[in-house]
Image (tube, rainbow, N blue to C red):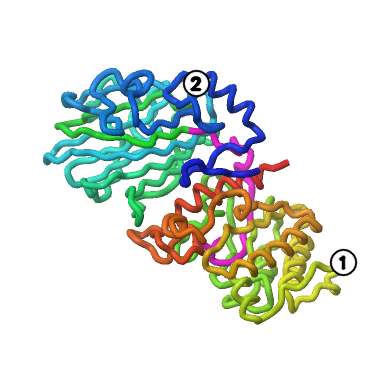
Amino acid sequence: MHVDHRRTRRPLRPRAVAALASLALCLVGLTARADAAPGVLVDETFGTQTTPPNFGFPTGAAVADGVLNVTQGMRDRTTSVKTFDSAVAQERTLDLAFDWRTTVAADGAKTGIELRDSQGALLFSLAATATELRYGLTGPVSDSTSAPDALNPNWTKVSLDRGKWYTVDLHLDFTLQTAQYTISTRETAAKVMASGTSNITGRNLAKLVACDYNGTGVQSLDNFRLSAPANAANGRLRGRTVYAFGDSIVHGHKYARGFVDLTAERERMSLTKYAMNGAAIGPVGESGQIVTQVRRAASHSPDYVVFNGGTNDADLVHNHRYKTGAMAGGFDPAAFDTSTYAGSFETTLSTMRTRWPGARIVYVAVHKLGSRDWNTQLALRSVALQICHKWGVTVADVFDDTTLDTRVDSRRVAYTFNDLVNGYPGTGGTGTHPNIAGITHFYVPVLTAALTRP
């Protein structure tokens, strides 16, 4: 599988399903451009007038200056509704991203947007007052003919910077009835305002509702992109158990929700995480070897074992603490040279196989690291892939199957972090630790594909 990115922040469908995606595009009579990529149902930047006009909003909307403005000239507690095509409503899993801004300024004023299903159940909502950014994933059912106080979503409130654009990323799963969401500022040093996974009652995506709850405040939408994920699990992983081992990329660095956590949340899996910052595959590591984590883990067999390794080894091998080594000729642990990376890698796999023979083992090859010596990365990757092939281990290949390369400075800034900002991973990291955008756009799709691969 190859996860490509026409725009760097969103993964697309692999070429293997291009024919089916093309059929889906023919069925979707939306505002999708003719050159939209496979799997993409709507991709609208509002650079020109849309078809239907104004993105399908009947009132209070206009495409102008490269954005879509809504709730223009609308009265209190009124709505304007865009209805999605029936092909969208038939999708069981959807990814949606868009940029949003509001001019609401008066005290007591509030405008926002709501995503609802065909029966009026709420999927997600975003709104603002003069001082608060509000979002909600639960609330009363509404037919969206009006927006009275009694039908408002159940709001969570955070601070609002009224001069900023905000970016919303959603993963909607109607089989599991969950929504994974991130709201962040749209800027180079993006600040995450909210992120989580929530239960929803909606069964499909049917409506985008522009709401003038009270007062006035024009809202603007841009970069509206709706797609069907390339490898949706569609409930197949629900209830499965997973043990996770590795270094800070699995652990999460300074944030509790690493990429395995977000995958498990999204798919309703039961996760036990043993990874530690500083751990390594080889015989030297700040927090010890990853095989030690494996030996200390619970004896009860999980359905899946997910691990990474090589990030800290790249520094240690480059600094001559130990050698890369080579794959052994057989499977006898006595033949593994545990003073090398390769021998330690095989020892780790042998220990996993012995402890949990029925578990599926998934090795995560992390992204291209601008923070490590390139030739050392390539050498460790080569031997790791050889060993995984030998042992029949599934590879979730973020390195090769995504465009996340933090040797490119813009990607390092956008997708990695060193410290928390507002309680969430920031931006502008060294290139090692993926932030929430890096996790959701690159790691989660590749790991999900590996977990569901036959």
Q: Does 361 lie within the magenta span?
A: no
User: Is disc 2 placed on a helix, strand or loop?
Assistant: loop
Quadrant hosting residue 239:
top right
Q: Amino acid at mark 1?
A: Gly
Picture quarter with the N terminus: top right
Q: Residue at x 36, y 53 (%)?
A: 192
Looking at the picture, does residue 121 appear above or below residue 337? above
Looking at the picture, does residue 317 appear above or below residue 252? below
Q: Residue at x 59, y 28 (%)?
A: 21
x, y percent for residue 324: 72, 73
Residue 28: assigned label: 2
Q: Over which residues does the magenta segment extend?
A: 227-252
Report the front residue among 264 and 139. Answer: 264
Asked if marks 2 and 1 touch (Cβ < 8 Å), the reply is no
User: Is disc 1 placed on a helix, strand or loop?
Assistant: loop
Residue assigned mark 1: 329
